[in-house]
Image: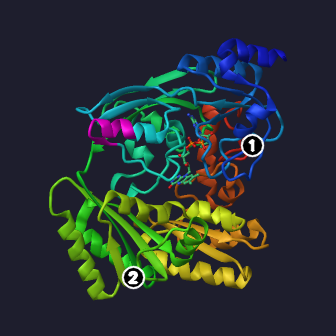
C-alpha cells in the first residue's frame, strides 16, 4: 500500500477505504454510464471528524477529491476523471438522522441520508419534506443540496435551496464550519451556506443539514389530462392556478411521444384518451373542498377546449399508477436509444414558441432526430431530450442551446453542470458572471482540489 493510501487508511479504517477496482466499480461511473472514471481510492468516512481529517490530509498531499452521494446525478459531477489520481469521497456512511422537530418543523440529517428515508421520517411525525424526485430512493440529502435539486414539487415549495435552514460543511483544507442553525430568520452577516448549495461539490463537502419541514396536506388529488398542444397546457395552468391557488404542487407536461416510450418499455397503460400532449397535475390541501375545486377547474378547461380528456385518481394506487407514467420516462428513454439530454429553463409564457422553434431548428440541422420532451411546466423547466439516431451530440447541444439563448433561458434548470455541460456553460454565461464564479472558487479552493473540472474548467480555476 502506498504512503498516501496508508495515511487515508489510518484515518478511516478498513470499512472506510476501498482500493480494489472491483469494489470501486460502482463509484467510478455515473448513473447514465457516460463518464467512466478511475478513482485513486474510495474513502467512506463515517463522521464529520473523519471527513475533516481526510480533507486535511488531501490538502496537505495535493490530492483532488470528488464528493459522492447516491451517484444519481445527471451531469457526471460525482465521478472522478481517468487519471487514477482523484479520491472519491463517499458520504454513504454518514447516514444518521440527527434530529426531528415537529414543532419547529425541522429535520437535521447527515449528508448520506437517503432522501426517501428523510421523507418517511417527516411523515412519521405528520410533516412533509417536499423535495421529491424519481431518484429519491437513492439520492442523498448531501447530493440533493449540492445540486440544488428540483423535482416535482418546486411549483409550490421551491427548489432544495428553499428547504435548507442550516449547513455543516468541511472546507478544502479540512476546516469544519458549523452553521447547523434551525432558524427561519437569520440575517446576521453573510448567508454563506448559499454558496455550497448547487455548487456540485466544487467548494467543499456538505456533511449535514437542517431542513425545513412543511405541514402535511391531508387531502391529495392527482389527475392526468390530455391537451391538444403546449399552448393549451399553458392555458390550463393559468386556469388551474386561478381556481386552485397554491394547492397545486406539481404541473407536469408530458409529450405523447414520452407516454408512448413508457408504454412500450414498461407495459404501462394510459387511462386518458390520446392527445399530442398530457399534463399530470397534483394538488394537496388540509381544508376540505379540494375535490370539488379540481372538478370545477376541469369542467371549465373542457369547456374552453384546453383539455381534451382526463381522469382523477380515485385511490392512492391509482395516483401512484399515474405518477409511474411520468417517473418512468427517463428510464424508458435509456432503453429506447442513445440520447442527448437538455434540462432547460425557459420563461413560462415562451414555452410553446420555444417548442416550435427548437423543433424547426432540429428539422433543419439534424433531420431524423426524435424529441422526448417532458418536464415541469409550472416551473418553466423542460427536459428536452433528443434521441440522436447517429447525429453528433455536440451539434445537437448547440442547436438546442442556441434556441434556449434566444429565449433568455438557462441550459441547466435543475440537473447542474457537472462535467457534462462545462464547455456549454463557458459559452453561454457572460464574462463578468464567469469572472465572479472564478473569484469565489479561487477564494475557497485556491489549489483547485475540490471536484476539479466540474462546473468550471480546470484551466480557468488555476
Ligand atoms: C431517474 C432519475 C430522476 C431524476 N429526477 C430529478 C429531478 O426531477 N430533479 C432533479 O433536480 N434531479 C433529478 N435527478 C438527478 C439527481 O437525482 C439529483 O441531482 C440528486 O440531487 C443527486 O443526489 P445524489 O446523492 O445522487 O448526488 P450525486 O450524484 O452523488 O452527486 C451530485 C453532485 O453533488 C456532489 N455531491 C454529492 N454529495 C455531496 C456532498 N455531501 N457534499 C458536496 N458535494 C456533494 C457531487 O460531487 C456531484 O457533483 C434524477 C436522477 C435520476 C437518476
Any magenta on residue 126? yes
| Residue 442 % position (x, y) | 65, 35
Vertical position of residue 404 compared to residue 185: above or below: below
Point out the residue furthest to the top here: 10
The residue carrying mark 2 is: 232
- In the picture, the quarter occupied by the C terminus is top right
Quadrant of the image occupied by residue 3: top right
* CA gap, disc 2 and disc 1: 45 Å
Can you give x and y, in whole percent of width and height, for residue 427 in the image? 68, 60
**In this picture, is 201 found above or below 310?**
above
Q: Which residue is mark 1?
A: 458
Q: State the image coordinates of residue 385 (x, y, percent, origin top left).
A: 62, 68
Task: Give the mark count.
Answer: 2
Near-viewer residue (142 or 307): 307
The N terminus sits in image quarter: top right
Q: Residue furthest left?
A: 288
The one nearer the camera, 84 or 380, is: 84
Image quadrant of ligand 1 equals top right
Amino acid at each position: 500500500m502506498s504512503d498516501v493510501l496508508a495515511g487515508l487508511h489510518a484515518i478511516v479504517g478498513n470499512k472506510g477505504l476501498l482500493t480494489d477496482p472491483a469494489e470501486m466499480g460502482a463509484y467510478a461511473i455515473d448513473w447514465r454510464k457516460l463518464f467512466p472514471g478511475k478513482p485513486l481510492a474510495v474513502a467512506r468516512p463515517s463522521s464529520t471528524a473523519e471527513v475533516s481529517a481526510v480533507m486535511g490530509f488531501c490538502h496537505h498531499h495535493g490530492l483532488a477529491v470528488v464528493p459522492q452521494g447516491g451517484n444519481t446525478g445527471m451531469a457526471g459531477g460525482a465521478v472522478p476523471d481517468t487519471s487514477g489520481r482523484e479520491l472519491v469521497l463517499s458520504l454513504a456512511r454518514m447516514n444518521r438522522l440527527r434530529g426531528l422537530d415537529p414543532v419547529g418543523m425541522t429535520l437535521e440529517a447527515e449528508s448520506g441520508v437517503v432522501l426517501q428515508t428523510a421523507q418517511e421520517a417527516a411523515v412519521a411525525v405528520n410533516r412533509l419534506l417536499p423535495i421529491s424526485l424519481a431518484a429519491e430512493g437513492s439520492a442523498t440529502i448531501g447530493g440533493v443540496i449540492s445540486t440544488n435539486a428540483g423535482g416535482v414539487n418546486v411549483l409550490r415549495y421551491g427548489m432544495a435551496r428553499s428547504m435548507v435552514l442550516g449547513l455543516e460543511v468541511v472546507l478544502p483544507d479540512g476546516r469544519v464550519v458549523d452553521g447547523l442553525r434551525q432558524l427561519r430568520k437569520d440575517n446576521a452577516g453573510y448567508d454563506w451556506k448559499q454558496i455550497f448549495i448547487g455548487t456540485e461539490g466544487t467548494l467543499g463537502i456538505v456533511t449535514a443539514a437542517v431542513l425545513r419541514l412543511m405541514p402535511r396536506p391531508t387531502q391529495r388529488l392527482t389527475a392526468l389530462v390530455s391537451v391538444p398542444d403546449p399552448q393549451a397546457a399553458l392555458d390550463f395552468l393559468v386556469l388551474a392556478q386561478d381556481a386552485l391557488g397554491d394547492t397545486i404542487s406539481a404541473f407536469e407536461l408530458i409529450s405523447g411521444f414520452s407516454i408512448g416510450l413508457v408504454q412500450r418499455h414498461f407495459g404501462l397503460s394510459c387511462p386518458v384518451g390520446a392527445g399530442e400532449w398530457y399534463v399530470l397535475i397534483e394538488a394537496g390541501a388540509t381544508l376540505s373542498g379540494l375535490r370539488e375545486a379540481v372538478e370545477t377547474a376541469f369542467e371549465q378547461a373542457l369547456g374552453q377546449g384546453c383539455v381534451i380528456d382526463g381522469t382523477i385518481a380515485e385511490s392512492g394506487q391509482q395516483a401512484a399508477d399515474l405518477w409511474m407514467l411520468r417517473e418512468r420516462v427517463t428510464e424508458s428513454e435509456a432503453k429506447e436509444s442513445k440520447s442527448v439530454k437538455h434540462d432547460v429553463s425557459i420563461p413560462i409564457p415562451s414555452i410553446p414558441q420555444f417548442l416550435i422553434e427548437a423543433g424547426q431548428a432540429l428539422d433543419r440541422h439534424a433531420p431524423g432526430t426524435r424529441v422526448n420532451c417532458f418536464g415541469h411546466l409550472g416551473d418553466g423547466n423542460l427536459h428536452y431530450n433528443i434521441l440522436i439516431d447517429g447525429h453528433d451530440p455536440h451539434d445537437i447541444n448547440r442547436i438546442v442551446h442556441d434556441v434556449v439563448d434566444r429565449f433568455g433561458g438557462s441550459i441547466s434548470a435543475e440537473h447542474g453542470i457537472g462535467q457534462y455541460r462545462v464547455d456549454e456553460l463557458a459559452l453561454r454565461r457572460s464574462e463578468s458572471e464567469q469572472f465572479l464564479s472564478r473569484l469565489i472558487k479561487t477564494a475557497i479552493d485556491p489549489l483547485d482540489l475540490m471536484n476539479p473540472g466540474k462546473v468550471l474548467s480546470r484551466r480557468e480555476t488555476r
